[in-house]
Image: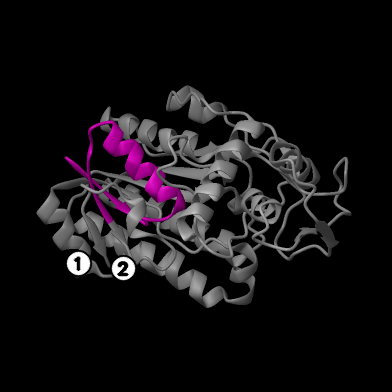
Amino acid sequence: MTILVTGGAGYIGSHMVHELVDRGERVVVLDNLSTGFDWAVPPATPLVVGETSDQRLVASLITEHGVTAIMHFAASIVVPDSVRDPLNYYRNNTVNSRALIETAVKAKVEHFIFSSTAAVYGDAGVVPIAEDCPTEPMSPYGWSKLMTEIVLRDVGNAHGLRYVILRYFNVAGADPQQRTGQSTERATHLIKVAIETALGQRPKMQLFGTDYATPDGTCIRDYIHVSDLARAHFDALRYLRAGGASISCNCGYGHGFSVLEVVDAVRRISGVDLRADFAPRRPGDPAQIVAGCERIRSVLGWQPALDDLSTIIGHALAWERELIARRR
């Protein structure tokens, strides 16, 4: 039994590959390396450079490696970019995913785990957000992911493909063993940007929107450690292997921090009074998104181990210093 991990050289995907290899699983990675890095993949793990939309290539990988499960991470993920360039997001996130799912069905792959997002909920107006809340995305990114969820639902009903959809809240941190982390240049993740600013990689950062209906006027998000997220995927795989029915689950901790709270925490942990300027709101940013996470705990048996903002920032800070050392 081999697991095909698409986007396995990227930020979250590479953590997943390390988690699977650590647990003794057989893995093959498919990544176009547009935002991923070959060094982020464990040395003994096969890495194939290519596209998820290349159905002939994917079919050959499934046959050659005996793939029985697919974990699909490959995607474009920057919300403002999706507003500026929606066609690219619908192609990369929806059209390519549809091709991958079709290949999986034809090859009789048993299990499919999909990397989705809390952006499918839009500005839900409730805290926390449960999986049965209405899905009303505010950006092409959110819509592109929701469309793929719908494809999976309909294909599952028609062809029996069993799947788990994991809706991520805000992913942050880095591998505690410092094997991989968020390494993409010009990344937009708040904690990454704040740490880069603290370490002098950016002269300043911007805080987008200070007039939201939150205690300090800045957006509130539920930050989940990337290693806990990888464990959630393994729990999803174990659930499907045990005969579990298709399901959607939120991936978060059930509590949030504001943008100002995160920036202040980075200042405290780094010891640097980084410069953060206020800026207008960005399109597609809801005021507050916090996960309702009862389902993932009760159904998948997920138990997070790194639910602590200081730990998340500490691991991300250590990884950023590692990147600086590598560049030197």
Residue visible at 57% across and 31% down in the picture: 293
Can you give x and y, in whole percent of width and height, for residue 264 in the image? Answer: 78, 42
Q: Name the side, left or right, on which 178 lies relative to 269.
A: left
Q: Closer to the N terminus: mark 1 or mark 2?
A: 2
Residue visible at 18% across and 50% down in the picture: 108
Q: Is residue 126 visible?
A: no
Question: Identity of the amino acid at label 2?
Answer: Glu
Specify whether residue 328 is painted magenta.
Answer: no
Question: Identity of the amino acid at label 1?
Answer: Leu
Give the crowd class for mark 2: few <14, some 14-19, many >=20 residues within 10 Å.
some
Q: Which residues are magenta?
A: 1-29
Q: Name the side, left or right, on which 266 lies relative to 28.
A: right
Q: Is the C-beta separation of discs 1 and 2 under 8 Å?
A: yes
The numbered disc on residue 215 is: none
The numbered disc on residue 51 is: 2
Q: Quadrant of residue 141?
A: bottom right
Give the crowd class for mark 1: few <14, some 14-19, many >=20 residues within 10 Å.
some
Q: Nearer the viewer, residue 234 or 309?
A: 309
Question: What secondary structure is found at the residue carrying circle 2?
Answer: loop
Which residue in the structure is indicated by mark 1? Answer: 57
In the displayed structure, would residue 109 be above or below residue 7?
above
Residue visible at 63% across and 76% down in the picture: 84
Residue visible at 44% across and 41% down in the picture: 178
In the displayed structure, would residue 17 be above or below residue 193?
above
